[in-house]
Amino acid sequence: MDFSTYKSIVNLNKKVLYETALKAIKNSHLEAHTMALNPQEPDFIAKIATAGIIDLANSWKNILMPYGISTSVVSVFCHQRPIVKHTMSSVNPEIGDLLIVHIYHPKKGKSKRTALLLQAKMMTDHTVKISTHDHQLLLYKHWPQFSFVKPKISGININVVPSQAHNGGQYLLIDDENFMGPFSCTYSTAEADETLIPANSLTHTMLKILLFEEGKEFLGRKAAHNKRDWSKLIWLLLENSVQKNFKRKNIKLSSASRTNGSNLNGLSGLYASLSNKNTPFITDLIGKKITNQSLQIAPENALIPFYKLEGEGGISTIIIESSHINQ
């Protein structure tokens, strides 16, 4: 089974994949309102990366597995975001609020990888106006050379090419007041520009990522090791958000804490829904011991394993790893 077969199966099930993802993300939004009186961007990101992804992962697993496709999902919520520094602004921007990564393994041949960085913005109208000199916009629109301020990563300057807006860095618009009317998408994505215009619903964007029609391609870890480009950036974010946090000695399994929005660090942790143990990318990041001994293959409607974080570094991350099941 090759990539064209994989795409055909996903497209065949596109409607139900969309519907289940839409339901999961919608429910996560409602949960954010039950957790906080006046939820803001971090509250919504927290619930997307935890409750929303748990529901989405289990649904997609059950839809695609009968067709011989395995989809395993790991989601990490980090309360704080990495800060970078570039010369186009005196204000240091966040690298983003949410990183979504998809890795596909064919039965034969090289794996495919795509990544999407999202910066969240609350909508106060049907579009969002941003200053031409906004430090975050300058990063996503021009991609000047930059370095990490927090966490401090010495000796590495990232130079993403081309130095212009691309599909790998976009905005996540949150329309909590239905400014777009009765057919509004609560979550939508927009290209980096002075006027942010909703282009796709987050649900549609997630499906496009599943089909490698969204995001920006990145290389494998070995190929990216000596580079200072987009691929290196994605691996630095994955290593600092996932790998370092979950290789700590004091990691322990616990139940997810509830939060009222003022204690989002109570949700910091890792949520995993594994279709099977054939997850080389996830295993490499989290560690073979944790993946094999602690993360259980999640049956339908089961509680998802949750790992409590002792640190707050990194960016909230959703990793989707798909492959073909030996039948």
Image (cartoon, rainbow, N blue to C red):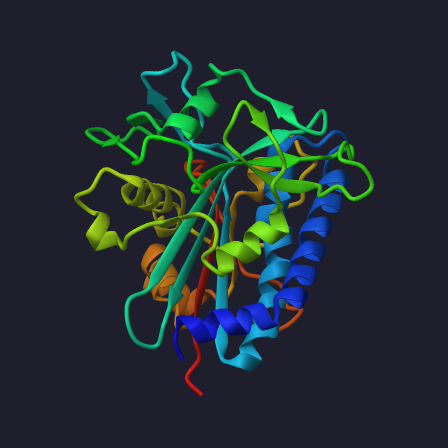
Is residue 276 in sight in this rendering?
no
- From what the image shows, is residue 284 above or below residue 30? below
Q: Position of residue 194 (x, y in %)?
A: 54, 22
Please state which of residues 277 and 234 is positioned toward the viewer in this rendering.
234
| Residue furthest bottom in the image | 327
Q: Residue at x 69, y 48 (%)?
A: 28
Query: In the image as oriented, which residue stretches furthest toward the right?
Result: 182
Residue 123, image quadrant:
top right
From this viewpoint, is residue 267 visible?
Answer: yes
- Give left or right: position of 191 versus 91: right
Q: Which residue is drawn at the image coordinates 75% and 39% (left, top)?
A: 33
Report the residue at 67% width, 39% height from top: 259
Q: Kindly indicate the quadrant of the structure image that contains residue 148.
A: top left
Give the quadrant of the N terminus. Answer: bottom left
**Where's residue 23, x and y in %?**
72, 56
* Residue reaching furthest to the left: 226
The correct choice, above or below, for 4 with respect to 247 in the image is below
Height in image: 213 above or below 80? below
